[in-house]
């Protein structure tokens, strides 16, 4: 098991980091030359005496990708948390047909990402899409919107699809946390005549917080490495290109294997740093709440 | 009384909105897949006529049947391999005491949360060096990176809850570690193995980045890649009907699987989450 994991994870990771310091190309990976930090940052001198900066750290395209990824992650995970909480609270209540509702909620989770991207691409189609049709007939928009193509709405489209697809996962994890809250706490609150919203803030939320934090970190890490949804729903779009899409473009489409590897390494570093920061901040806030 | 009625109505409206939002997109995909010709471009909410022409086209032209076969083969191989490795590893991690065990477990878990792009370049080199590029073996091998950590994690958590007395009895009767795993643990762990196996199957069936990168010819593709790259007759024409038909074909078995094993899957997901 450890041998397999080393072969499939540790070794490739080290090779990727190594390639990041070389000028490897796709056709002939073996003959890569060491270029130090050249892929990250270098100053190129032209024969005329002028010079310019080169490398990932001064590439506006890279920073756009970082910004896209962070924006995507923060917005969609926040929305998924709020909606997931609502769905979990509904599923936690006793009512007839709960089993059916739970089954329905599982549907988006079960659908492959590529399929949901294609399904939504069709629903969001500018000419024949049903979403434009609904919004038009409700009078919410005055003309049809090219959701996935227009730079202003492409990110909104991506977020809509991600929220639709991932809220069930969030809801299920929160629901598991809700079900561990002992029922007598609610009975006590009922006897004391505490208003429902206060019960939510003072009883439910603090007790479900550990499960919530875990759910958020799972979804956050998943969003930070997003690739397939964006690649299929909004191909070749500057406004939605994520870090992973950027790195893969350089690796395989632009034939700059070394540069793409450097970008991959940065993705890994960024996510590692954000994870450590989140876990540290999470610990602090949890211990702060206990005091 | 009236306030209670309004409350109930509001609650059921909320339930209704949730159900419609969750199910409608897939319903609409089925609806679209049953339309033919220009009917495709009339927006409608109810089925008017049923035509299977899109399904026939998808299954009879191109390599889609072959792609389904690839996906099935790869996903099954991934499940069997990761369960085999997972059970033996979980046994070691939950029963054999050694230093740094919890650190090792944490490292294993963090691997499954890895950005896959970080290993893409290295894996690509490795797969070409092994000579398995553009074969199912490449993907079976690559998918271990996310199925194995998860399998090990859940199975270890499950195995820890099993009483040690059972295996002590087996040891007294002279059973070897392999006998203990295969004759004692596997029957007891059947439920956990079904859960993790299903989740591994779904993950392998849905994966896109590796499948896109490590295959070159259309006959070697898995279904997600095939659907993503499904083109039309003309350069600018997107065959929405065919895409929706293909989507429905690959999703329905998965949906049936998920709904049949609903409880097991939810239990597996939350075990991975809550104990993580």
Image (cartoon, coloured by chain):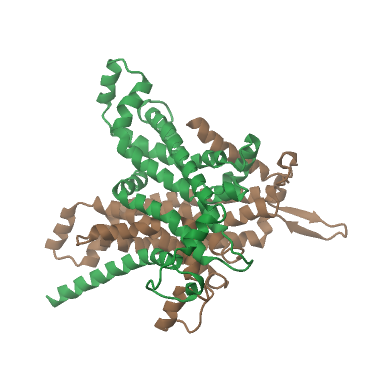
Asked if one can make out residue A203 in the rendered structure from this viewpoint, the answer is no
Q: Quadrant of residue A67?
A: bottom right
Q: Is residue A175 visible?
A: yes
Measuring from the top left, give residue A232's x and y in whole percent: 55, 60
Q: Colour of chain B?
A: green
**Residue at 31% of width from left, 63% of height from top?**
A86
Q: Quick one: quadrant of the C terminus of chain B?
A: top left
The location of residue A84, given as percent across then percent down, is: 35, 60
The answer to whether B83 is drawn above or below residue A285 in the figure is above
Q: Is residue A76 above or below residue A8?
A: below
Residue with the most extreme right position: A48
Question: Looking at the picture, how far across and down is residue B20, in whole percent?
Answer: 33, 68
Placement of the N terminus of chain B among the 4 image quadrants: bottom left
Residue drawn at x 52%, y 40% is B140
State the residue at coordinates (53%, 38%).
Answer: B141
Place residue A89 in its image quadrant. bottom left
Residue sitting at 11 percent across and 62 percent down? A191
Q: Nearer the viewer, residue A136 or B31?
A: B31
Judge from the rendering whether residue B265 lies leftward or rightward of residue B138; answer left or right: left
Q: Position of residue A182 (x, y in %)?
A: 20, 51
Could you tell me how many numbered marks the image carries?
0
Q: Say which colour chain A has.
A: brown
In this picture, residue A37 sits left or right of residue B56: right
């Amino acid at each position: 098991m450890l041998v397999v994991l080393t072969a499939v994870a540790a070794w490739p990771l080290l090779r990727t980091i190594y390639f990041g310091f070389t000028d490897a190309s796709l056709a002939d990976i073996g003959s890569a030359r060491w270029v130090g930090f050249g892929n990250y940052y270098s100053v190129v001198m032209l024969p005329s005496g002028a010079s310019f900066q080169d490398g990932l750290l001064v590439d506006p395209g890279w920073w756009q990708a970082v910004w896209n990824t962070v924006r995507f992650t923060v917005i969609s995970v926040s929305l998924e948390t709020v909606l997931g909480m609502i769905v979990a609270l509904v599923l936690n209540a006793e009512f007839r047909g709960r089993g059916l509702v739970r089954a329905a909620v599982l549907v988006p989770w079960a659908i492959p990402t590529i399929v949901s991207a294609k399904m939504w691409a069709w629903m969001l189609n500018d000419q024949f899409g049903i979403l434009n049709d609904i919004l038009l007939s409700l009078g919410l928009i005055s003309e049809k919107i090219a959701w996935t193509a227009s730079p202003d709405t492409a990110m909104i489209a991506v977020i809509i699809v991600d929220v639709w697809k991932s809220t069930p996962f969030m809801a299920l994890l929160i629901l598991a946390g809700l079900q561990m809250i002992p029922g007598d706490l609610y009975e006590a609150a009922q006897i004391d005549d505490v208003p429902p919203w206060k019960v939510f803030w003072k009883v439910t939320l603090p007790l479900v917080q550990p499960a919530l934090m875990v759910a958020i970190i799972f979804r956050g890490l998943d969003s930070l490495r997003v690739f397939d949804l964006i690649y299929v729903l909004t191909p070749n779009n500057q406004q939605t290109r994520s870090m992973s899409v950027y790195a893969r473009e350089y690796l395989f489409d632009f034939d700059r294997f070394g540069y793409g590897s450097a970008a991959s390494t940065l993705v890994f570093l960024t996510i590692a740093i954000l994870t450590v920061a989140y876990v540290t901040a999470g610990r602090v806030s949890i211990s702060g709440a206990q005091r | 009384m009236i306030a209670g009625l309004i409350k109930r109505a509001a609650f059921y409206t909320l339930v209704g909105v949730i159900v419609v939002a969750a199910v409608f997109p897939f319903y609409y995909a089925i609806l679209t897949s049953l339309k033919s010709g220009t009917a495709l471009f009339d927006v409608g909410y109810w089925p008017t006529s049923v035509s299977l022409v899109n399904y026939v086209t998808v299954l009879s032209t191109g390599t889609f049947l072959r792609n389904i076969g690839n996906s099935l083969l790869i996903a099954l191989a991934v499940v069997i391999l990761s369960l085999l490795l997972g059970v033996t590893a979980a046994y070691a991690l939950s029963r054999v005491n050694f230093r740094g065990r919890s650190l090792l477990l944490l490292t294993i878990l963090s691997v499954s949360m890895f950005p896959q792009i970080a290993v893409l370049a290295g894996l690509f080199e490795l797969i070409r060096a092994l000579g398995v590029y553009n074969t199912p073996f490449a993907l079976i091998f690559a998918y271990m990176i996310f199925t194995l950590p998860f399998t090990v994690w859940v199975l270890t958590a499950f195995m820890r809850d099993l009483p040690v007395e059972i295996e002590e009895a087996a040891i007294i009767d002279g059973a070897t570690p392999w006998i203990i795993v295969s004759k004692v643990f596997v029957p007891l762990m059947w439920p956990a193995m079904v859960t993790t196996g299903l989740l591994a199957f779904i993950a392998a069936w849905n994966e896109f980045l590796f499948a896109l990168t490590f295959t070159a010819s259309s006959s070697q593709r898995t279904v997600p890649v095939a659907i993503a790259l499904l083109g039309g007759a003309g350069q600018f024409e997107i065959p929405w009907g065919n895409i929706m038909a293909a989507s429905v074909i690959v999703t329905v078995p998965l949906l049936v699987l998920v709904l049949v094993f609903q409880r097991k899957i939810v239990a597996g997901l939350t075990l991975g989450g809550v104990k993580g």
